[in-house]
Image: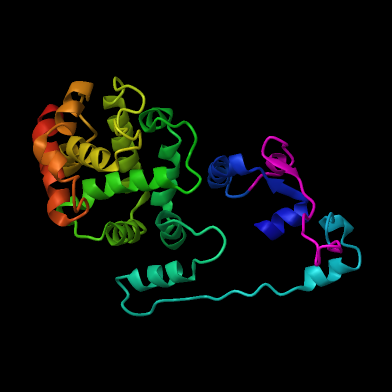
Amino acid sequence: MSIYYFVKQRFLRNNKRAELRTIFDEHGNIPERVIHDDAYFENFRLRLPGSTPNRENRFRGLSYATLDTYKVQFELRTIRNVIIKQNMPQDDDSSMFEVFNRLNTGGINLTPQEIRTSMYHSSFYDMLYRENSRPAWRHLLGNQEPDLHMKDIEILLRGFAMLVDGHIYAPSMVRFLNQFSRKCKSQSSEQNAYLANLFDSFLLACKDLPEGAFLNKQNRRFNVALYEVVFAAICGPSFAKGESLPSGTLSSELLANLETDRQFLETLVEGTTQTRSVRTRLDRARALLGSSFE
């Protein structure tokens, strides 16, 4: 993309990266009108340090159009790619993820979710991107802008993973989410549409919650452990029957009952992603919330 932007002589503004990802997912490309929109891009020229303290770099200030004699060299330069493929075992990509993670050094490292998105992109992930832009979801997150490093996408993924496969959860969380993402690559458009409708129904059930209802009261960070089990507990009965979420409302009082539950809180002290902790949180959420949505 850096080479593409250089040729276009435009470069993306840092605060628009997450928004541009949404535009790309919607159109399958970056429309020309967006590239030439100063709200998203700015004119680009090379900004390079001098080769020595007293000597300016000869490429400093140049653009693609002003490369002159170097343009041919630039256009003929080979772009080398290394393709890594895992042949065995075929049903587990953990080795691929580890190789990707080890190669991921220098510059700004990718997060596990960014690596996951690269390895397991599918129509299921396209659905996650769409749901991530829902105003009601942004309201619950307490943040109107999509996260540049896909933390919000990972939160959505964890909720669906707990709903569908929480009963077979085993650590680590990274491996669990990788396996679920791989599994979802084979889902039909009907299955993805059903999960999207179920999530929309969940948002409707949360309509009376205040903004940032799932934020930790102490550090104001999003409480993923709370959200994922609440989502799984509320949607679980409907998911088991293949139905949309029945009418019902998640109140602040119901949510507070779970947040302050002694057994629930004990699972957040140590070993939060251990099997027993996750299963206990799911059980407590079902016990305190599930009956209101059956």
In which image quadrant can residue 257 be found?
A: top left
84 is within the stretch colored magenta = no
Residue range in magenta is 30-58
Based on the displayed image, in which of its 4 quarters is residue 3 positioned?
bottom right
Q: Nearer the viewer, residue 151 or 53?
A: 53
The figure's colour scheme reads rainbow
* Left or right, residue 4 beside residue 55: left
- In the rendered image, residue 105, in percent from the top left (x then y), is placed at 51, 66
Q: Quadrant of the C terminus?
A: top left
Q: Position of residue 205 (x, y in %)?
A: 26, 26
Q: Nearer the viewer, residue 147 or 263?
A: 263
Position above or below: 101 against 132: below
Q: Which quadrant does the N terminus fall into?
A: bottom right
Identity of the residue furthest to the top in this view: 208
Q: Is residue 127 visible?
A: no
Is residue 39 found inside the magenta-colored segment of the image? yes
272 to the left or right of 74? left
Residue in the image at 34% along x and 44% along y: 155
Would residue 162 be visible to someone looking at this image? Answer: yes
Q: Residue furthest front?
A: 53
Which residue is drawn at the image coordinates 21% and 36% (left, top)? 230
Does residue 164 appear to the left or right of 122 in the view shown? left
Looking at the picture, tell me which residue is in the foreground, 186 or 73. 73
Q: Residue at x 17, y 25 (%)?
A: 254
The majority secondary structure of the magenta stretch comes to: loop
How far from the left and from the top, in percent, is residue 104? 49, 66
Position of 153 relative to 89 (above/below): above
Which residue is pictured at 29% across the width and 22% down the height?
Answer: 209
